[in-house]
Amino acid sequence: MHGTAGLAAEKRRTSLRGVPQGGSDLIERETMEKCMLKLRGIKARPHDIDAMMLHHPSLVEMHCSVDDLRWVPTRCYNVPLAVHLPEYHRGYLIDPASLVEADRRAAQDLYVKAIHSAHTWSSYFSGKPKIVFHPGGMGVEKFTATTCNVARAQLDKTIEAMVAVAGEDADILVENLPAHCCFFGGEWYANIATRSEDLVSICKGHSIGMTLDLCHLYLAAQAQKFDVPAAVAVAAPYVRHVHYSGAAGVDGEGLDVDHPDNTFDLAAAIRPILDVDAVAVPEVWFGHENGGAGFVHAWEALEERLESGYT
């Protein structure tokens, strides 16, 4: 189901690496210059990272629970590292923009702990680790404009603390959220950082970068009626890391790229940032199962769409 004929797969990989089928050296160099974004990042957790590494990813993104932060690597991995900070703790959402100061401070303390863990892990990986985090501001009801401003000020305090701890040893990357989220079996609203302009404001204010989640951006666009390609163009100068998957409606995230219910033209959305020096990581439901077969399938499906021009 997830396999691809060896010759066809190699031809796709070769073309996307910038080696044209029968093209000239000049075309090869031009293609390489235009395709800096690597599409084969992979998600992992401490218990399955060795299995994921068998696929030779361009980067490993550790999607951590709070307990995972105690992980001690036992071998070196010759790839860059991204650390996706925990989203839940003791049955609650971790909210770095919480209107309740005690809850915001608890989120800050956990994020600082995670940055220390990432710094420790970095000696087992290559380069500077990327710290991926959700900006918070979620609620079961939509915030007023005033409340959004308060939440944004709370988030600013958390990011200031994160940047101070990270220093030059890690890149802090805020991730955009869909407008509609599903938590604890019900619908929630993300009230800040759903539009590219929101993320750019945060990035400029703290001199940090962005994790652009293309699926989240599409879902937010469906709910808030903005143009995805235009939003990608606004975000592009600040993008340092990318997430992708198929999507549908306002809250259907994590679909396979070639899922029959997918309505998101992912290839068109990602083309404008192919010249960004970053790694894109698929976030598809159950991608980790069967040794990461779903992630490999996502790589191949996106590569095929980029080469063939269909969605």
Image (cartoon, rainbow, N blue to C red):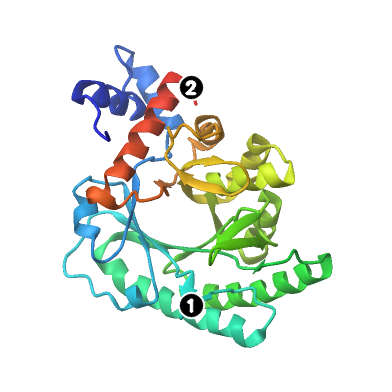
| Residue 121 horizontal side relative to residue 95, left or right | left
CA gap, disc 1 to disc 2? 41 Å
Residue 244 seen anywhere in this rendered image of the structure:
no
Residue at the farthest left position:
75
Q: Tell me the amino acid under the disc marked 1.
A: Gly
State yes or no: discs 1 and 2 in contact (Cβ < 8 Å). Answer: no
Q: How many marks?
A: 2
Q: Which residue is mark 1?
A: 91
Q: Tell me the amino acid under the disc marked 2.
A: Tyr
**Residue 72 horizontal/vertical position (percent):** 24, 75
**Residue 13 horizontal/vertical position (percent):** 30, 29
In terms of depth relative to the viewer, which is nearer, 108 or 292? 292
Q: Quadrant of the N terminus?
A: top left
Residue 113 seen anywhere in this rendered image of the structure:
yes
Q: Which residue does the image show at 59% across and 74% down from the upper left?
A: 96
Classify 10 Å Cα crowding around label 1: few (below 14), some (14-19), many (20 and above). few
Q: Which residue is mark 2?
A: 310
Q: Earlier in the sequence, mark 1 or mark 2?
A: 1
